[in-house]
């Protein structure tokens, strides 16, 4: 964000999640992707609803949206908290918990590389959006970016880009609507 604030760049477009704190510093254009918490579990004991986690342990990363969400909304679910993604996913592979909760986009890629696991819950909790950002008050650029995003959506470009880039990295049973906006 500092590059936008200092004028080093005019536009940031990457995996940039819209948050109220960031919106105080930059202006966001229309979002083109979304991310939620997903839950991955072994194929033989698929978790498809949070109620199935009662009396079981859920693996999460420390300081993540998933940890905060489950602590606030499901305080009775026991959390196994790890510092690093590698530790967290290894804990699931080792069977230390019934399931793992993390950003669904990360889970979608992980299950492709780890047969025997499925995203039984593709989205839970708040849906965050990913959007380009411009310097605060740059209305002209923001409006132009919005028009371009609309054009890219209407022409099918964003869906095509998903199919060429993300779909090959995700498990084949993932619905593009779990990630893309306006699909």
Image (tube, helix red, strand yellow):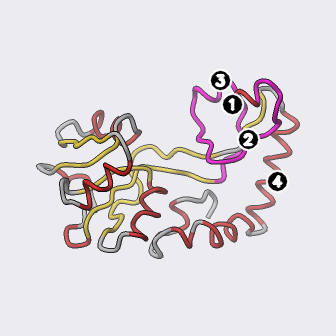
Answer few, some or many: residues within 10 Å of disc 4's Cα (few below 14, many 20 plus, some between 14 and 19): few
Which residue appears at 44% of the width and 74% of the height?
173
- Tell which circle, 2 or 1, labels the residue nearer the N-terminal end: 1
Q: Which residues are magenta?
A: 4-32
Work out whether 59 lies above or below 157: above
Which residue is nearer to you in this view: 2 or 27?
A: 2
Q: CA distance from mark 4 to mark 1?
A: 22 Å
Q: Is residue 37 magenta?
A: no
Could you tell me how far apart the alpha carbons at marks 4 and 3 are, in whole angstroms? 24 Å
User: Mark 3 packing: few (<14 Cα in 10 Å), some, or many (20+)?
Assistant: few
| Quadrant the N terminus occupies | top right
**Local secondary structure at mark 1:** loop
Q: Nearer the viewer, mark 2 or mark 3?
A: 2
Residues 167 and 53: in front is 167
Tell me whether circle 2 and circle 1 mark residues in contact (CB < 8 Å): yes
Q: Residue at x 81, y 46 (%)?
A: 145
| Residue corresponding to mark 1 | 1
Which numbered disc covers residue 24? 3
Question: Residue 76: image x %, image y %?
Answer: 17, 39
As drawn, the label of residue 148 is 4
Q: Earlier in the sequence, mark 3 or mark 1?
A: 1
Residue bearing mark 2: 12
Helix, strand or loop at label 2? It is: strand
């Amino acid at each position: 964000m500092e590059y936008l604030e200092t004028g080093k760049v005019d536009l940031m477009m990457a995996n940039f999640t819209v948050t109220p704190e960031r919106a105080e510093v930059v202006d966001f254009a229309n979002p083109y992707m979304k991310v939620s918490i997903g839950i991955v579990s072994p194929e033989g004991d698929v978790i498809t609803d949070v109620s199935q986690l009662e009396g079981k342990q859920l693996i999460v990363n420390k300081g993540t949206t998933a940890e905060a969400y489950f602590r606030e909304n499901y305080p009775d679910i026991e959390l196994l908290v790890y510092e690093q993604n590698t530790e967290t996913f290894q804990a699931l592979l080792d069977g230390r918990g019934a399931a793992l909760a993390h950003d669904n986009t990360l889970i979608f890629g992980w299950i492709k590389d780890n047969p025997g696991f499925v995203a039984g819950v593709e989205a839970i909790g708040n849906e965050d959006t990913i959007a380009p950002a411009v310097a605060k008050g740059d209305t002209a650029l923001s409006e132009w970016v919005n028009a371009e995003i609309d054009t890219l959506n209407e022409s099918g470009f964003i869906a095509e880009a998903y199919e060429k880039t993300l779909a090959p990295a995700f498990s084949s049973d993932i619905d593009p609507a779990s990630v893309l906006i306006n699909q």
